[in-house]
Image: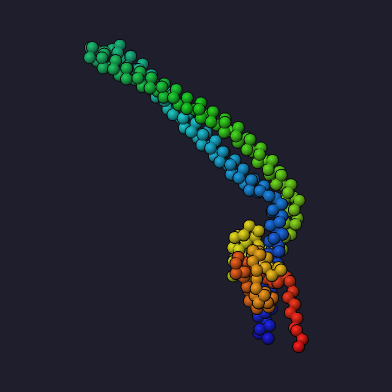
Amino acid sequence: MAAVATETTIAQKLEALLKLQNIDSSLDAIKKMRGDLPEEVRDLEDEVAGIETRISKFNKEIAALDEEISKNRNAKKDAEKLVNKYKDQQMNVRNNREYDAISKEIELQQLEMELADKRTREFEFKILNKKDDVSETETRLNTRKKDLDAKKKELDVLIAESEDDEQKLNKDRDKAAKHVEERLLRPYDKLRGNYPNGLAVVLVKRGACGGCFSAVPPQRQADIKDKKRIIVCEHCGRILADVEDVIIIEKVKK
């Protein structure tokens, strides 16, 4: 009786795995109908986000340059005030030495004013270049946003066509996954990720593995049909759940 219970348990495990595989294969078929659109949408979303980040960086640089221009203009105003102050002082000097000293201070502040003007022009030139960069990048952004909108609409149409089926299959998958042991679910998911067709659990069809099509010896097929243990393909590692073809062994009468 214990042996029968074991056989039933293994059979149930294989049945649960096969059911999960069938659901996943149906979901894969739905996703395959969408082609590369989901990936294209993700790539465009990433590109748009990257362009927006670049524009934000340009605008921050422009703001920093504007701040520098403001500082230089304030520095020029301060220098102008000092020049006026020194000129007033020149009117009340007592000797040539004081006059020459104040004249040097005036020259120094005038140089500061010229330097401030020079830096302001340089920063204004940089701002013009940055604004050109922003304009070009915004044009590119608008183009990519239009492309993204078009791709999203196209994808939305495809999703809408299969949305009900996909939701039902996802619910069925959640239920089916609960009947698969965790120690089997992990390798199952790993196997699915290893193969483009997502097949982790297959049948033996016409004497060959349903995944890699390698031949499965008759004795191994018999073991698979007995379902006393979980058997994997020796070549691809996929789980062999059952044998599709019925092996008929005829006894020769003596």
Quadrant of the image occupied by residue 230 = bottom right
Q: In this view, does 5 lie to the left or right of 118?
A: right
Toward the viewer: 174 or 194?
A: 194
- Name the image quarter holding the N terminus: bottom right
Q: Is residue 177 visible?
A: no
Q: Looking at the image, which residue sits at the far bottom? A: 254
Q: Where is residue 8 in the image (x, y as percent from the top left)?
A: 69, 78
- Which residue is found at the position 69% from the left and 40% from the top? 150
- Which residue is found at the position 68% from the left and 61% from the top? 24
Q: Can residue 159 be seen in this view?
A: yes
Q: Is residue 216 above or below residue 153?
A: below
- Name the image quarter holding the C terminus: bottom right
Q: Is residue 80 left or right of residue 56?
A: left
Toward the viewer: 149 or 226?
A: 226
- Which residue is found at the position 69% from the left and 53% from the top? 32
Q: In this view, does 75 lie to the left or right of 177?
A: left
Q: Looking at the image, which residue sits at the far front? A: 254
Q: Is residue 164 above or below residue 254?
A: above
Q: Where is residue 186 in the image (x, y as percent from the top left)?
A: 59, 66
- Which residue is found at the position 75% from the left and 81% from the top? 250
Toward the viewer: 198 or 155?
A: 198
Q: Position of residue 66 (x, y in %)?
A: 48, 29
Q: Is residue 125 above or below residue 203?
A: above
